[in-house]
Image (tube, grey):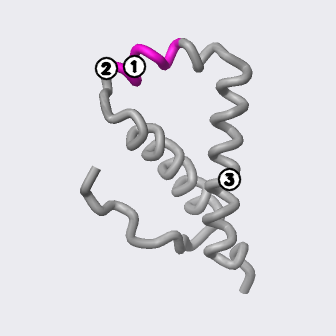
Amino acid sequence: MTDQWLDTLITATPQEGFELAVLLSRRSVKYTQPDLSILQKLRPEYADSADGLTAAAHVLALNFQTVAAANNYWRP
């Protein structure tokens, strides 16, 4: 991937920050496995897996932690 899509981690609200964290998480999967057919083929394996979903939630939490820190935890 060579397109530049992430200009900043700064967001106006925690909700926007969470949505950015979701986008970061999704883009990281797409970046790691750019072949859409393989992604679609593998999805059932992790979509029904408690371990897979827990791992995905962990990645999302780490990305949200990063965005929150970049935004000084939205403190005035």
Residue at 46% across, 38% down:
29
Residue at 64% across, 44% down:
59
Q: Main secondary structure of the magenta part?
A: helix
**Which residue is disc 1 drawn over?**
40
Does 41 appear in magenta? Answer: yes
**Which residue is disc 3 drawn over?**
62
Quick one: SS at disc 1?
helix
The relative height of residue 34 versus residue 72 in the rendered view (above or below) is above
Residue at 54% across, 71% down:
11
Q: Position of residue 26 (x, y in %)?
A: 48, 42
Does 56 appear in magenta? Answer: no
**Which residue is disc 2 drawn over?**
37
The relative height of residue 64 versus residue 57 in the rendered view (above or below) is below
Residue reaching furthest to the bottom: 76
Q: Position of residue 47 (x, y in %)?
A: 58, 19
Q: Which residues are magenta?
A: 38-44
Disc on the earlier residue, 1 or 3: 1
Quick one: SS at disc 3?
helix
- Picture quarter with the C terminus: bottom right
- Res 30 quadrant in image: top left
The answer to which of 72 and 58 lies nearer the viewer is: 58
How far apart are the alpha carbons under marks 2 and 1?
5 Å
